[in-house]
Amino acid sequence: MTNTTISRIILSATTAMFLTACGGGGGSSTPIADTEAPVITVPATQTVPFGGTYTAAVATVTDNIDTGLTATPSGTVDTNTAGNYTITYSATDAAGNTGTATTVVTVSPASTVDDTEAPVITVPATQTVPFGGTYTPAVATVEDNVDTGLTATIGGDTVDVNIAGNYNVTYTATDTAGNTGTATTVVTVTVDPDTITDTLTGLVWDKNASDTCTSPKTVPTIAQFQTIMDYSTFEPAVVSGFNLAKDATEYKTSDGWNIKLHDGQIENNTTATKTICVDATNEVNVTKQNLTRDADTNLVTDPNTGLVWDDTPSLPTGTFSDANNTCIGNEMRLPTITELNSIYDRDNKKIVDGFTDVNSIGGNGHFWTSTVAVGNADQAWTVGFSSDSNATWSGEVAAYAKTQTHIIRCVK
């Protein structure tokens, strides 16, 4: 065997050993799997001025195997609406692994330096709701020179569908610069056809008589009841518009008085069973106060009515004719029923504070009024005054023959 042959054998053996060690020589192997997602680097935050131009932040992508990958942003930014917007960046490598990262883009509020224009609110000028119906506030639209998405806040009067009348409902909106716009809708709750509203007193009356009253309606006080009495008529002596029988039925009040509608006579008892219900929610009360008395002239002035009353010690008495002559001689006159009632405190059954006690001036009894009994020219109306709150006739309104003698208190 030659040296050349020996060298070839040694080389072949060495080669075979090398291939075996390296996995060659006809064997096979599996590549290691890629499960690592790309890593995206972007700024955590980004700020854009209101109304400015938004450009997505620059993102860099690194991967354990692939190179040249790019990130794709998703999401929108409205530079005309201040606020925070999240933009998501994503990149996927050749093995299908996806990496993500986010940037919070802040659109700064509009500059308040130059924005002096208030939002404009558009609402219907009027709105009508049927009595006892359902009230739904009108829809308002808000427009602003800078801001969008503004809404109006409702305020003003609270609409009560059980009380007829007008209610001013206000709408208010404020922009980011602090400018406030307002608008108003007048909501009208129509009148209940079964009621009568007295605009002078604010009282709302049922047209028909009732045995009981349901809230918010109540049995009226005698003072409230007298506001609907008309002593210039007869059968019944109540203002027009009520559906009431023309008879001698007595109607009860909440404070122990009865009143006859056919002639207006008031009695201090509780025998009546029917009444006229009233809603006094919006009642206008006139408080009798600051009465002034001139000790030299014995005159009492009522600033609430403008009336000046005679408060002379020991008031005179006489017939209806005497009463008229006495007052005319003093350059005064006899009061009407309404006027004389204005100085009677029906809650406490006495003359209002500011006058001399009726007992001390001979005034404990019935006082003549100038109101003649309609339908009976021989009678005139009187109002009873007593210092005794237990007197059954104190405060009653009754008609008497003109020839009878009663107390005279003049007014001007």
Image: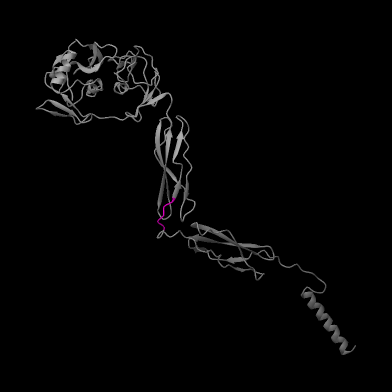
Q: Nearer the viewer, residue 159 or 379?
A: 379
How many numbered badges does the structure rendering display?
Answer: 0
Question: Quarter of the image containing the N terminus?
Answer: bottom right
Q: Nearer the viewer, residue 102 or 257?
A: 257
The question of residue 117 being in magenta is answered with yes
- Which image quadrant for residue 256? top left
Q: Is 325 situated above or below 105?
A: above
Q: Is residue 181 left or right of residue 321?
A: right
Q: Main secondary structure of the magenta part?
A: loop
Q: Residue furthest right?
A: 1
Q: Is residue 153 left or right of residue 411?
A: right
* Residue 287 x/y as whole percent: 25, 30
- Which image quadrant for residue 307? top left
Q: Residue furthest bottom?
A: 3
Q: Is 78 situated above or below 10?
A: above
Q: Is 205 situated above or below 175?
A: above
**Magenta segment boundaries in residue numbering:** 115-119
